[in-house]
């Protein structure tokens, strides 16, 4: 098993004929965290999807060592299923056992909602469910796109604890957010620094 | 293999819960009961034309679930989450093809029995029809799924999928309906060949379409 790592060098992204950002270098080792900041539409989500391998970088290279897990604004849980069954489906694909789902649901304070259909959950509960899937996956590289959206203070501190625990175990966290997140000593990347030159101030 | 099974089980359950499994069956029965009203109750005429008409009904019924096959999972991020787990899009489409056929093929074949009775088809024709459908429904399922992957990101994909699928379905219709009046079995072999071809290319073409739709 190779060591965990995520390395971006000279990454640029073109979406819809427009150059969103360029020249992004990022080298993450085990235990490292990065916080991607910037206003709406600047390319935070695109950068996260490039890290995940769902988008190709227009220029530059992306290397991933270790499995990747992602949460974004789309829930990807079956609405009619009870929460527990919906999470179990992904755990089966991840090769994670039921204990992993138990622990993840406990970490996000979802244990009491296990039998509630996903469509009945509130915005914050859905976000916590998506984060529970990230925790249960057991993947070393966490990519979190706006993980704090819709979470109350209690849930935010749960998220902070989960992230801290993951980093302590040698994981990697890359989070994109326009609001402050409870990350300890992250590498802060302000997306404004990577705009194409003619648009930079 | 275990992954394909997990995915197919989930797809089948989703189809069942969205009540999409009854739609093609209800459509086929409805067409079969309307047809005698349109052409009159002449038993000989119904017997002569009913088999081909049921093939058209089966083909159109296979297009009904197309807008629910891929687009909802694409929009809700399920396809992306599967891709993140290192599972190829070809596997996703293969699992979906299995689930889609299981939910659609046997139900359509069973619905053909009362439909055939409505059209006064004789036992030999029913036998040929069911054999043809057994060979042809995997191709109909594959065609519907292929079109669903191609149109998943588009608006008003329903009308477009009809336009895309129907020309491709012409060989199936010719050989499928051809089996009814053909004693040599050649039409059945051509139907099998067309069916194999569609089933074989759908996972690859559909997988490529899902990947291309991500850009």
Image (cartoon, grey):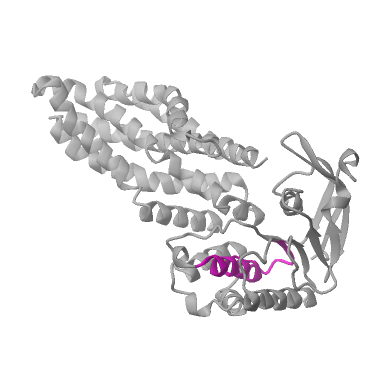
Q: Of residues A27 and A195, which is closer to you in this image?
A: A195
Whether residue A4 is visible, yes or no, is no
x, y percent for residue A190:
84, 57
Counting every numbered tag in the picture gives: 0
Residue B40 as seen in the image, left or right of residue A29: left
What residue is drawn where x is 49% and y is 69%?
A83
* Above or below: residue B82 compared with residue B46: below
x, y percent for residue A60:
86, 44
Q: Quadrant of residue A32?
A: bottom right
What residue occupies the far front of the structure in this picture?
A201
Q: In which quarter of the image is residue B26?
A: top left
Q: Of residues B124 and A175, which is closer to you in this image?
A: A175
In the picture, which quadrant includes the N terminus of chain A? bottom right
Q: Quadrant of residue B135?
A: top left
Q: Main secondary structure of the magenta part?
A: helix
Asked whether residue B38 is drawn in magenta, I would say no
Q: Of residues A29 and B51, which is closer to you in this image?
A: A29
Residue A109 as seen in the image, left or right of residue A192: left
x, y percent for residue B30:
21, 36
Q: Of residues B138 and B12, which is closer to you in this image?
A: B12
Whether residue B215 is visible, yes or no, is yes
* Start-end of magenta stretch: A122-144
x, y percent for residue B117:
14, 35
What residue occupies the far left of the structure in this picture?
B42
């Amino acid at each position: 098993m190779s060591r965990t790592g995520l390395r971006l060098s000279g990454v640029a992204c073109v979406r819809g004929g427009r150059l969103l950002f360029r020249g992004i270098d990022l080298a993450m080792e085990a235990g490292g965290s990065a916080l991607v900041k910037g206003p709406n539409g600047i390319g935070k989500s695109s950068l996260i999807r490039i890290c995940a391998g769902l988008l190709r970088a227009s220029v530059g290279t992306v290397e991933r060592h270790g499995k990747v897990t992602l949460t974004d604004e789309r829930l990807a849980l079956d609405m009619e299923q009870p929460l527990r069954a919906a999470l179990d489906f992904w755990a089966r694909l991840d090769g994670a056992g039921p204990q992993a789902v138990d622990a993840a649901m406990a970490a996000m304070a979802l244990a009491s909602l296990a039998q509630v259909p996903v469509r009945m959950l509130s915005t914050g509960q859905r976000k916590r469910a998506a984060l529970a899937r990230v925790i249960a996956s057991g993947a070393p590289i966490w990519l979190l796109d706006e993980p704090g959206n819709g979470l109350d203070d209690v849930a935010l501190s749960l998220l902070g604890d989960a992230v801290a625990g993951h980093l302590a175990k040698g994981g990697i966290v890359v989070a994109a957010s326009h609001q402050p997140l409870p990350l300890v000593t992250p590498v802060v990347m302000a997306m404004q620094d990577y705009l194409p030159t003619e648009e930079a101030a | 293999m275990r992954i394909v099974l997990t995915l197919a089980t989930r797809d089948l359950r989703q189809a069942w819960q969205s009540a999409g499994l009854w739609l093609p069956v209800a459509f086929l029965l409805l067409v079969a009961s309307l047809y005698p009203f349109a052409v009159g109750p002449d038993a000989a005429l119904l017997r002569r034309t009913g088999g081909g008409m049921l093939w058209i009904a089966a083909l159109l019924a296979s297009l009904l679930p197309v807008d629910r096959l891929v687009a909802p999972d694409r929009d809700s991020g399920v396809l992306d989450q599967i891709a993140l787990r290192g599972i190829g899009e070809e596997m996703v489409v293969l699992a979906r093809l299995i689930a889609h056929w299981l939910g659609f093929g046997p139900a359509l074949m069973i619905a053909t029995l009362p439909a055939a009775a409505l059209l006064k088809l004789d036992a030999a024709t029913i036998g040929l029809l069911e054999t043809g459908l057994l060979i042809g429904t995997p191709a109909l399922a594959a065609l519907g799924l292929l079109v669903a992957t191609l149109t998943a990101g588009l608006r008003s994909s329903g009308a477009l999928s009809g336009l895309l699928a129907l020309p491709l379905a012409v060989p199936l219709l010719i050989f499928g309906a051809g089996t009814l009046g053909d004693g040599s079995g050649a039409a059945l072999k051509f139907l099998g060949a067309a069916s194999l071809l569609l089933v074989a290319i759908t996972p690859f073409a559909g997988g490529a379409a899902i990947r291309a739709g991500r850009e």
